[in-house]
Image (cartoon, rainbow, N blue to C red):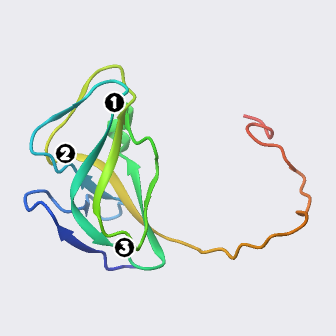
Amino acid sequence: MTLELRLERIKSDVPLPRYQTEHAAGLDLHAALDAPLVLEPGDIRLIACGFRMAVPVGYEAQVRPRSGLASKHGISMPNAPGTIDADYRGEVCVPLINLGREPFTVEPHMRIAQMVIAPVAHAKVVEVQALDETQRGQGGFGSTGC
């Protein structure tokens, strides 16, 4: 299935999101920086991506860390995955965190995250007096084993 994702450039020199391979699930997002930015260990910085968009109604944009940055440098997102709703029209930004032990430099136009467009189901909230019982019950956080 192909959807139309409407994008508006804010910074003309920053690449728009795109799939890097034919079967990629995520579009790569680029840093809209004018100069390199150093993330010290533990730092969290909001990085602009240089565009605004209109996610189709009934969908969300899930913003996720790039696996290579995470596994090689400890660069991730403190809210992974982040959600961009269909009614948001501001600039797309990515909060990056340096979980590594060394400073990391985010270069202008560097691919910093990936974005997956996914369907959203809306639930009807129904208050009840009691829930049905299950075999698992209230067990959580390792209750079924590691």
* Mark 1 and mark 3: Cα distance apart in space: 30 Å
**What is the secondary structure assignment of the residue under circle 1?**
loop
Q: Earlier in the sequence, mark 1 or mark 2?
A: 1
* Mark 1 and mark 2: Cα distance apart in space: 18 Å
Q: Nearer the viewer, residue 76 or 129?
A: 129
Classify residue 91 as left or right of residue 124: left
Look at label 3 and name its amino acid. Val
Say the numbered circle drawn on residue 43: 1
Seen at 80% across and 70% down, the residue is 127
Residue ID for mark 2: 110
Look at label 2 and name its amino acid. Met
In this rendering, which labeled residue sits more in front, label 1 or label 3?
1
Whether residue 65 is visible to the viewer of this picture, yes or no, is: yes
Quadrant in which residue 146 is drawn:
top right
In this rendering, which labeled residue sits more in front, label 1 or label 2?
1
Seen at 20% across and 48% down, the residue is 31
Q: Is residue 140 above or below residue 132?
A: above
Q: Nearer the viewer, residue 90 or 139?
A: 90
Q: Earlier in the sequence, mark 2 or mark 3?
A: 3
